[in-house]
């Protein structure tokens, strides 16, 4: 199924996905009744003798986002379908115990370096660094105990147009092999305009590689079936080719005329058999560096649910849930089989510390890492 998709922003500006730089005004259409935007907090358990909390954000449309300060995990996003029936569109667990036992990064903030670093090694300013390896011989998503496995400090907020949560964590010098004391702050904001805004910031006292992102698994059909019937659009002309260990080769092939091309909306499962192992590739977004731009759109014809993604990040990892194998029983006892979830991880490119041609990921003292991603939820009849 092929569709040209148009996006209405703040009721004023009509853009196609090909025209991908946008400006958002989150102050439009203010409401006076603050009771319809709320944040609630309940105890979720303890980790390392630290309290873990579950925060529930709600907006006027009935969109509910649940987040825990363990790993910065988005545990739930509840959205109505085309008939107004609410349903949870992300994979996860009902209890902290399950997240601690076996979590393939469901909903978490991953880093210090999201995605893979080859052989768990890099050289910076003439010094060689060795990282914790946890993906064969490579380092993945920050190592054995990345940001997804720590308890963050948290504070909630609400005003007339938005509600949200601020998380902060100090990753100490040498943690998982990375240099520098890295201060990280994540702000999750749910707006009255049905947007979940994620802003990730970081500062370091030593030069260090930084690549931070959220790792939510989406299934707009509430994990009642796989995601192969979802329709995806990606604003990207190239992707980072990888070897058998999913490490970039340095080559950026064109997607044109291949099963990797989602510039025109395509059903995910239609050409997957042409991609070895399924989709697990970083797409080079067609955008100006640092601009908040359209990156992707995901639509489920069965439920009518749609998620549009905007980001300042240069890349997006599309992962089609190839390693889900039916051994995980998630929320409400649902079994997560192969392709029962997908990730659209806005990020920098994998293995960038070892790839000089990729966008720079080194954060120096005095600099600030700041990246924004917006998820806009809607339904189509």
Image: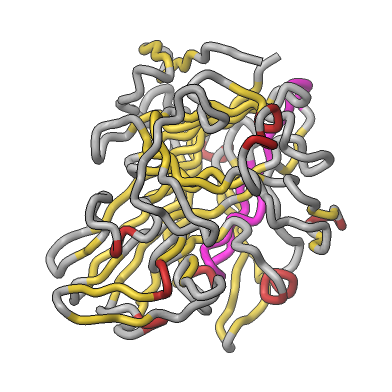
Q: Which of 330 and 119 is in front in this view?
A: 119
Instruction: Residue at the far right: name it.
Output: 333
Q: Position of residue 147 (x, y in %)?
A: 47, 70
Give the residue drawn at x 58%, y 48%. Answer: 57
Q: How many marks?
A: 0
Q: Give the quadrant of the C terminus.
A: top right
Q: Nearer the viewer, residue 145 or 189?
A: 145
* Relative vertical location of residue 214 with respect to residue 222 in this rendering, above or below: below
Res. 3 image quadrant: top right
Q: Nearer the viewer, residue 96 or 334?
A: 334
Does residue 230 appear anywhere in the picture?
yes
Q: Is residue 127 left or right of residue 77?
A: left
Q: Where is residue 327 in the image (x, y as percent from the top left)?
A: 82, 63
Give the residue drawn at x 41%, y 75%. Answer: 120
Q: Give the quadrant of the N terminus.
A: top right
Res. 73 image quadrant: bottom right
Q: Which residues lie in the magenta part?
A: 64-84
Examine the structure image and report whether residue 81 is included in the region drawn in magenta: yes
Does residue 150 appear anywhere in the picture?
no
Q: Is residue 183 left or right of residue 378?
A: left
Give the residue drawn at x 40%, y 56%. Answer: 350
Which color scheme does this rendered protein use?
A: secondary structure
Examine the structure image and report whether residue 108 is included in the region drawn in magenta: no
* Relative vertical location of residue 154 with respect to residue 28 in this rendering, above or below: below
Instruction: Residue at the far bottom: name it.
Output: 49
Q: Where is residue 16 in the image (x, y as percent from the top left)?
A: 42, 14
Q: Position of residue 72 (x, y in %)?
A: 52, 63
Give the residue drawn at x 83%, y 41%. Answer: 224
Q: Which of 143 and 170 is in front in this view?
A: 143
Res. 130 image quadrant: bottom left
């Amino acid at each position: 199924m092929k569709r040209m998709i148009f996006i209405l922003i703040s009721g004023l500006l009509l853009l196609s996905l090909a025209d991908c730089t946008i400006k958002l005004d989150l102050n439009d259409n203010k409401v006076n009744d603050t009771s319809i935007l709320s944040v609630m907090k309940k105890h979720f358990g303890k980790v390392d003798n630290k309290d873990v909390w579950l925060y529930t954000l709600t907006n006027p449309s009935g969109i509910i986002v649940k987040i825990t300060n363990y790993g910065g995990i988005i545990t739930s996003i509840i959205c109505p379908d085309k008939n107004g029936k609410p349903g949870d569109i992300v994979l996860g667990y009902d209890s902290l115990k399950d997240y601690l036992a076996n979590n393939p990064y469901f909903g978490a903030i991953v880093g210090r370096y999201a995605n893979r670093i080859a052989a768990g090694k890099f050289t910076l300013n003439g010094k060689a660094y060795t990282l914790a390896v946890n993906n064969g011989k490579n380092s993945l998503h920050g190592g054995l105990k990345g940001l997804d496995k720590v308890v963050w400090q948290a504070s909630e907020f609400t005003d007339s147009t938005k509600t949200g949560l601020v998380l902060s964590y100090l990753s100490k010098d040498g943690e998982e092999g990375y240099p520098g004391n890295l201060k990280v702050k994540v702000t999750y904001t749910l707006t009255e305009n049905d947007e979940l805004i994620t802003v990730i910031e970081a500062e370091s006292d030593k030069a260090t590689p930084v690549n931070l992102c959220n790792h939510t698994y989406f299934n707009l059909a509430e994990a009642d079936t796989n995601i192969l019937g979802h329709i995806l659009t990606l604003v990207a002309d190239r992707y980072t080719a990888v070897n058998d260990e999913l490490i970039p080769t340095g080559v950026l092939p064109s997607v044109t005329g291949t099963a990797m091309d989602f510039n025109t909306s395509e059903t995910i499962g239609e050409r997957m058999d042409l991609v070895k192992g399924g989709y697990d590739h970083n797409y080079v977004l067609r955008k100006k560096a640092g601009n908040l731009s359209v990156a992707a759109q995901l639509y489920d014809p069965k439920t009518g649910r749609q998620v549009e993604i905007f980001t300042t990040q240069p890349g997006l990892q599309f992962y089609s849930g190839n390693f889900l194998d039916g051994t995980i029983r998630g929320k409400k006892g649902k079994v997560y089989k192969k392709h029962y979830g997908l990730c659209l991880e806005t990020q920098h490119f994998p293995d960038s510390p070892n790839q000089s041609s990729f966008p720079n990921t080194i954060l120096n003292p005095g600099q600030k890492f700041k990246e924004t991603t917006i998820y806009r939820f809607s339904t189509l009849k």
